[in-house]
Amino acid sequence: MFSLGTRNSFVVLPLAIALPDIWAAAVVVIVLQSLVELLGMVAYLAWVPRLVKPPR
């Protein structure tokens, strides 16, 4: 379930850094995407246990 929410953006980060300066915005987009995925993972960690385990 958790792997559906993340895509490992840091794998392509070195490739984006190697691009010419005109593509510098790609690095910013990749880092922001990673932050969104991190916040999503924190939300998943709070939500999924409640979904799987029935309340008492």
Image (cartoon, rainbow, N blue to C red):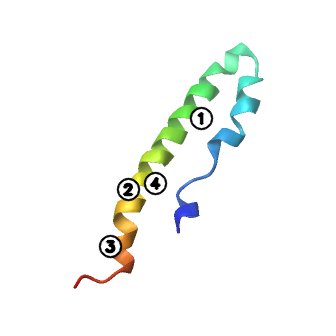
Lower sequence index among marks 4 and 1: 1
Q: In this figure, which residue is indicated by the disc labeled 1?
A: 30
Q: Residue at x 39, y 69 (%)?
A: 48
Number of marks drawn? 4
Q: CA distance from mark 1 to mark 2?
A: 20 Å
Instruction: Name the amino acid, label 3.
Output: Arg
| Residue 55, placed above or below residue 7 | below
Pointer 4 with pointer 2, Cβ within 8 A: yes
Q: Earlier in the sequence, mark 3 or mark 2?
A: 2
The residue drawn where x is 35% and y is 75% is 51
Q: Which residue is mark 2?
A: 43
Q: Which residue is mark 4?
A: 41
User: Which circle marks residue 15 in the picture?
Assistant: none
* Mark 3 neighbour class, 10 Å CA radius: few under 14, some 14 to 19, many 20 or more: few
Discs 3, 4 touching: Cβ within 8 Å:
no
Residue type highlighted by circle 2: Ala
* Residues at marks 4 and 1, CA–CA distance in whole angstroms: 16 Å
